[in-house]
Image (tube, helix red, strand yellow):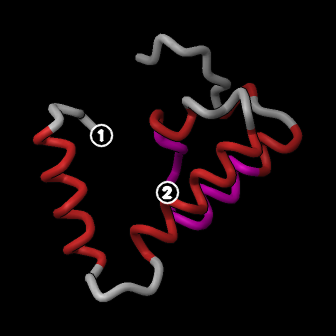
Amino acid sequence: MAWIKVVEEEEAEGELKETYERIKRQRSMPRVGNVLKLHSLNPRALSLGADFMWWLMRGESGLSAPQREMIATVVSATLQCRY
């Protein structure tokens, strides 16, 4: 649970609701992850950050998506971060 106030999907309205829906469609996921919801009080920052992360992990690269996921996993484990 975050210590930062977040807007849950059921409570989202306007630009935030649209951003949540776009993120779920883009990632074919049933819900928005908590790490993204941390930016829910600033929908524009959420949108830009989510797009940047999507580009890093799924955009054109010399590394495959699984290689990028493995790098992210190793970095998170090294930093003792659950995400």
Residue type, numbered disc 1: Tyr
Per the model, the C-alpha gap separating discs 2 and 1 is 16 Å
- Looking at the image, tell me whether mark 2 or mark 1 is earlier in sequence order: 2
In front of the other: 32 or 52: 52
Q: Which residue is mark 2?
A: 29
Residue 22 x %, y %: 69, 59
Position above or below: 1 against 14: above
Tell me the element at label 2. Answer: loop
Tell me the element at label 1. Answer: loop
Magenta span of residues: 19-33
Say which residue appears at 52% left-offset and 51% top-offset. Answer: 30
Name the quarter where the C terminus is drawn. Answer: top left
Say which residue appears at 30% left-offset and 88% top-offset. Answer: 62
Q: What label sits on residue 22 in the rendered view?
A: none
Q: Main secondary structure of the magenta part?
A: helix
Residue 55 x %, y %: 51, 71
In front of the other: 10 or 72: 72
Say which residue appears at 55% left-offset and 61% top-offset. Answer: 52
* Label 2 CA crowd tier, 10 Å (few <14, some 14–19, many 20+): few
Q: Which residue is mark 1?
A: 83
